[in-house]
């Protein structure tokens, strides 16, 4: 949870005491407006026959002195005059059926805020499930009520506000019609109340928290959702069939909005973070402290320039603002990608998101404020104090969408230079390990045909101030330009053609570009790669990538065909993310879903995929088939089985710059069995089994998750994880023997045990205490060392013969293995970590008052 303090400054008029009507007057009023119904045939929607003309609800404008009082009662005069909804339809468990419990929703607005009143009638009000949950915990076992606004009316983007009978808050950003971003947060208010007829939710959402266009047509998209936990029932006002393949584009229309604009308010989000680290160390190290404490503070600012453009700024944001990344041991050649959770960077993600499938992003915001890329030169017997990350001196971002369908996003950030302190020979010196760096991103998109088609461009740039010879190893600048498009066609837009093209240019000294060519995402120096040209003298490198896809998104049968490529010289890792280049690939995927209850399953689907990928030199490094089966049983338990089959393939990255190594085919099965989510406790049993065709490699994991809520205020989740990895050809080292290069691999016996534990206590709907802890242990030992004799031979023993035991010895003094021709460091490892985060968070009692104090403390204990 974000440790933060929120202050809001803006023009808000204090509401005068509203005029009240007698209780239950809404249902008794003789002149009440007719309910707004939205009835659709589920089969017709899935087939693409969609008519939104009948799904319309009117919003009622009231003066500030008639604004509803936020008390969860719905007995204000404004609610009696507002049009109610009617006719909610189920999405689960009986798609298209009338909701078992009646729900009414109304919309009222003033010049500063929009109000939503939802009355959830219930035949058995004592069985309404309610839970005090932490912010954005959308998986809690509780009844839910949600309102979603497509305020741009682009049929692709929506802002969701959800609450429970206890008044918990969840806000979600919907993007690209069906994608969800739970990291988005807004400041809004809600009041709830339970009574003899069910429960009530009364929302107040400041217009400053929404983005919308100021055009003459102020029609918004809108939908309302209700979940009844004990019935596992989800229903919508504007029905969303599970086979539709759409979400935001199926919203109804909200009419009656006139002369509104977002107030030009300012939000200030200060934060503080403290950290304690305990780790084993050398007593002679002058930088070592058994208890290492650290603290920092920063500030985020948000200003509504117009109703559709928002300016955000940040000073000194830190990854400590959010929960620590989970521990893991990465034994591959590729970098680990972590999700972005810093609030400044999650704002406007629907505009800046540009994903390059598979496993790539044109813009990866965690490059900004990353760990220093250079390591200090430490003399023998010396010590170093190295900062964990570069400090962001400041960043600005402007993002929004115009009434004519243009989306615009501009970001600029500067990170400061980083030095490491090195102690040697009784003195301390400072060594530069990261230069002053500027990052820039620009994004423009244009929608057509009411959001059914669109094009966009993205540009990124990185500049480093290389004012020290130590930085000659780093690229001085890098640029990327990308173009993407989508076009939905056919009945209801069930078919889609989309794609992207990206080009890159990177510059630097000959040393920097040599390191780039030899990096794990390129490996230009491979001795068997005749299609690659390795040139240690170049000072720039260019590359490109592209992908096109044709897919069917709606109906019981869906499918997709896609193909793409990434040239050997594409380089995105200064401001994007790309694991590897030099590939072209194709994929075919088909899925069948059945949502009619049978004798075993309430619903089920089966999905198959085939993938083929080659390098530009024609090496087949992926030939795989994947099958996924998921079923929801009649008793509301769920089962998922994923089966993956890879055939023998050449892996250009295994030997870290050596020849492509033939890897044996394997089969893996991943299974999940989840208990009834309606219960106060749930058990999620998960495991993986993998078996290689040759070499005797095995992988077994078991990672169940148990969650229980003993009281409405307390929730506990425990996620133990245990894995056993027996891999016969794990990479160890590259060595030189009599002038020739040898590659050493070994059999790893790795055992990992971890536990992710979370305890949350809700003092009130807006104040909660969270404790997150993760002990992590991973031990790996290597035996049966092998050399590469014939990298592409189909027989495992011929390809990787054993190094004779009698010629290999371990020197305990140097911790190195030695043969008559070479030596290498003992690769055994033992990682022990304990991560702990504790935070208390309080949302503001109203959107115009504050502050919102919060406190976060973190601790980490590590060892090797």
Image (tube, rainbow, N blue to C red):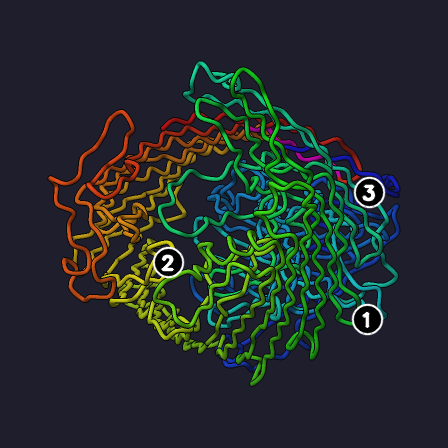
**Category of crowding for the residue at label 3, using alpha-carbon neighbours closer than 10 angstroms: few (below 14), some (14–19), many (at least 20):** some
Residue 164 visible within the image: yes
Is 774 in front, or is 419?
419
Residue occupied by mark 1: 217
Nearer the observer, 130 or 527: 527
Q: Where is residue 206 in the image (x, y as percent from the top left)?
A: 77, 48
Comes first in the chain, label 3 or label 1: 1
> Residue at (75%, 59%) from the top-left corner?
400
Residue drawn at (79%, 34%), measured in percent from left and top? Answer: 849
In the displayed structure, 733 sits above or below 559; it is above
| Direction from residue 206 to residue 813 in the image, left or right | left
Disc 3 or disc 1, which is closer to the eye? 3
The circle on residue 653 is 2
Q: Quadrant of the N terminus?
A: top right
Which residue is identified by label 3? Answer: 266
User: Which residue is at the far front?
Assistant: 738
Q: If you read the primary sequence from the N terminus, does the residue marked by circle 2 or circle 3 appear first?
A: 3
- Disc 3 is placed on an element classified as strand
Select label 2 or label 3 by which is in front.
2
What is the span of residues highlighted in magenta in the rendered image? 839-846
Task: Tell me which residue sits at (63%, 35%) in the image.
Answer: 418
């Amino acid at each position: 949870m974000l440790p933060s303090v929120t202050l809001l400054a803006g023009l808000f008029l204090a509401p005068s005491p509203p005029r009240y009507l007698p209780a239950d007057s809404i249902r008794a009023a003789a002149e009440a407006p007719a309910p707004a119904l939205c009835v659709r045939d589920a089969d017709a929607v899935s087939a693409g026959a969609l008519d939104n003309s009948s799904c319309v609800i009117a919003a009622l404008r009231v003066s500030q002195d008639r604004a509803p009082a936020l008390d969860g009662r719905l007995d204000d005069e404004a609610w009696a005059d507002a049009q109610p909804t009617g006719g909610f339809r189920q999405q689960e468990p009986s798609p298209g059926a009338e909701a078992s419990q009646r729900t009414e929703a109304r919309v009222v607005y003033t010049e500063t805020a929009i109000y939503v009143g939802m009355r959830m009638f219930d035949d058995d009000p004592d069985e309404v499930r309610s839970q005090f949950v932490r912010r954005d915990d959308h998986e809690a076992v509780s009844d839910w009520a949600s309102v979603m606004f497509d305020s741009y009316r682009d049929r692709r983007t929506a802002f969701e506000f959800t609450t429970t009978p206890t008044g918990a808050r969840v806000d979600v950003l919907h993007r690209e019609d069906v994608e969800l971003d739970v990291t988005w947060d807004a400041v809004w208010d809600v009041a709830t109340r339970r009574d003899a007829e069910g429960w009530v939710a009364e929302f107040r959402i400041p217009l400053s928290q929404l983005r919308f266009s100021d055009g003459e047509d102020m029609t918004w998209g809108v939908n309302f959702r209700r979940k009844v936990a004990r019935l596992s029932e989800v229903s919508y006002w504007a029905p969303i069939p599970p086979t539709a393949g759409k979400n935001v584009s199926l919203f109804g229309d909200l009419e009656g909005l006139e002369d509104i604009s977002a107030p030009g308010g300012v939000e200030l989000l200060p934060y503080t973070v403290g950290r304690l680290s305990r780790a084993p160390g050398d007593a002679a190290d002058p930088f070592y402290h058994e208890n290492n404490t650290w603290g920092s503070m920063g500030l985020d600012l948000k200003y509504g320039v117009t109703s559709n453009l928002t300016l955000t700024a940040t000073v000194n944001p830190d990854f400590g603002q959010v929960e620590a990344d989970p521990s893991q041991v990465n034994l591959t050649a590729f970098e680990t990608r972590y999700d972005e959770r810093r609030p400044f960077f999650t704002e406007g993600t629907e505009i800046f998101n540009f994903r390059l499938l598979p496993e790539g992003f044109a813009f990866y915001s965690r490059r900004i404020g990353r760990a220093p890329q250079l390591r200090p030169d430490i003399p023998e017997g010396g010590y170093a104090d190295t900062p964990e990350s570069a400090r962001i001196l400041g960043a600005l971002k402007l993002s929004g969408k115009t009434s004519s369908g243009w989306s615009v996003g501009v970001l600029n950030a500067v990170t400061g230079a980083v030095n490491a302190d090195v102690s040697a020979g009784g003195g301390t010196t400072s060594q530069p390990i990261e230069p002053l760096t500027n990052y820039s991103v620009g994004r423009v998109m244009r929608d057509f045909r009411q959001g059914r088609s669109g094009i966009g461009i993205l540009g990124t740039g990185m500049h480093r101030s290389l004012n020290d010879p130590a930085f000659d190893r780093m690229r001085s600048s890098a640029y990327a330009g990308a173009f993407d498009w989508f076009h939905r066609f056919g009945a209801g837009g069930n078919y889609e053609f989309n794609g992207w093209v990206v080009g890159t240019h990177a510059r630097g000294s000959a040393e920097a570009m040599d390191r780039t060519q030899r990096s794990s995402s390129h490996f230009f120096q491979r001795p068997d790669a005749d299609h690659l040209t390795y040139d240690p003298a170049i000072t720039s490198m260019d590359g490109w990538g592209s992908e096109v896809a044709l897919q069917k998104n709606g109906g019981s049968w869906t499918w997709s065909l896609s193909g793409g490529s990434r040239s050997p010289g594409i380089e995105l890792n200064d401001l994007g993310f790309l694991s590897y280049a030099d590939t072209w690939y194709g994929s075919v995927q088909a899925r069948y879903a059945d949502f009619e209850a049978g004798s075993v399953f309430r619903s089920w689907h089966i999905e198959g995929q085939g993938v083929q990928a080659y390098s530009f030199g024609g090496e087949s490094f992926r030939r795989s088939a994947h099958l996924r089966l998921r079923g929801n049983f009649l008793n509301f338990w769920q089962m998922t089985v994923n089966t993956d089959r890879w055939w023998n393939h050449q892996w250009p990255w295994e030997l870290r710059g050596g020849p492509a190594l033939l890897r044996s085919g394997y089969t893996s099965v991943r299974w999940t069995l989840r208990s009834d989510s309606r219960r106060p406790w749930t058990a999620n049993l998960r495991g993986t089994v993998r078996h290689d065709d040759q070499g005797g490699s095995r992988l077994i994991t078991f990672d169940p998750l148990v969650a229980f809520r003993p009281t409405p205020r307390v929730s506990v989740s425990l996620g133990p994880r245990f894995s056993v990895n027996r891999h016969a050809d794990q990479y160890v080292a590259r060595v030189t023997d009599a002038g020739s290069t040898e590659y050493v691999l070994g059999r790893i016996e790795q055992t990992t045990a971890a536990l992710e534990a979370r305890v949350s206590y809700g003092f009130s709907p807006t104040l909660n205490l969270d404790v997150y802890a993760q002990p992590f242990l991973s031990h790996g030992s290597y035996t049966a060392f092998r050399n590469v004799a014939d990298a592409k031979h189909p027989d495992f023993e011929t390809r990787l013969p054993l190094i004779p035991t009698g010629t290999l010895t371990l020197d305990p003094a140097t911790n190195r293995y030695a043969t008559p021709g070479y030596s290498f460091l003992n690769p055994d490892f033992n990682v022990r970590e304990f991560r702990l985060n504790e935070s208390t968070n309080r949302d503001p009692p109203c959107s115009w008052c504050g502050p919102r104090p919060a406190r976060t403390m973190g601790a980490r204990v590590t060892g090797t």
